[in-house]
Amino acid sequence: ETGVTQTPRHLVMGMTNKKSLKCEQHLGHNAMYWYKQSAKKPLELMFVYNFKEQTENNSVPSRFSPECPNSSHLFLHLHTLQPEDSALYLCASTIGGNTEAFFGQGTRLTVV
Amino acid sequence: KQEVTQIPAALSVPEGENLVLNCSFTDSAIYNLQWFRQDPGKGLTSLLLIQSSQREQTSGRLNASLDKSSGRSTLYIAASQPGDSATYLCAVTNQAGTALIFGKGTTLSVSS
């Protein structure tokens, strides 16, 4: 248990569905991140939030929509996804960008 | 653009062996380097964080070194155990200091 909790752990959704991934941290960190992990590829940074403000969007398609209502919670809203979006989605948090990162257990997403 | 490479991609050793995992990065202007462990289908667990001003860090049987000028880091595992079997990921902070850039990892299998 790292202090970063992601729900759900597994999600299967159709291409026309709308769903959301949730990440919560109780470490007092002020930066939160979404990463995508696909087979045979390095982890890909998707979004970065510092003090609830989005500071980085790594050219992510608009069918992925992040939301950060406060420093402890981060959401990833999903709509009209494609099968190639199936992957492990990981959330992480840090005190600042240059400090040790703590990751959640991830959400395994399957788009059918 | 920062790129991180890990060699080898996979490694199998008998229990008790000492081993070295390698990580290289293309841009030496990093803030820090972090080694993670990932078990199948799970999130990442932080093993060691080396600040750019440091040369090495140690935790138990693990020792990580950093040579920033040559763009290299190694993770040394002493007296390997079957429980060490996992994928080991190396990551460096990006130039903006806002997030981690990952390698593809080295998958380690330790047989008893």
Image: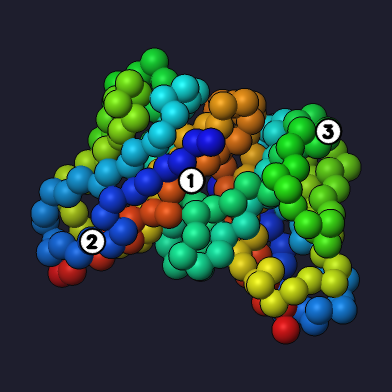
Q: B55 above or below B82?
A: above
Q: A24 above or below A97?
A: below
Secondary element under disc 1, as helix, strand or loop, is: strand
**Residues at marks 2 and 1, CA–CA distance in whole angstroms:** 19 Å
Task: Judge by depth and name the residue closer to the eye, B87 or B92.
Answer: B92
Residue B53 spot, x, y in % from top left:
39, 15
> Label 3 lies in what chain?
A
* Amino acid at the residue labelled 1: Phe
Asked if badge 2 and badge 1 are on a common chain, one would say yes
> Label 1 lies in what chain?
B
Q: Residues within 10 Å of mark 2 (few under 14, many from 20)?
A: some
Mark positioned earlier in the residue sequence (2 or 1)? 2
Q: Residues within 10 Å of mark 1 (few under 14, many from 20)?
A: many
Location of mark 1 (residue): B102
Secondary element under disc 3, as helix, strand or loop, is: strand
- Do residues under tags 2 and 1 come within 8 Å of each other at their CB atoms? no
* Amino acid at the residue labelled 2: Leu
Q: Residue B84, can we see it? A: no
On screen, residue B44 versus residue A12, left or right, reads: left
Residue at 75%, 74% (x, y): give it. Answer: A82
Which label belongs to residue A53?
3
* Amino acid at the residue labelled 3: Glu
Q: Residue B43, can we see it? A: yes
Residue located farthest toward the front when viewing the structure as drawn: B1
Secondary element under disc 2, as helix, strand or loop, is: strand
Location of mark 2 (residue): B11
Q: Residues within 10 Å of mark 3 (few under 14, many from 20)?
A: some
Residue B86 spot, x, y in % from top left:
35, 60
**Residues at marks 2 and 3, CA–CA distance in whole angstroms:** 41 Å
> Label 2 lies in what chain?
B
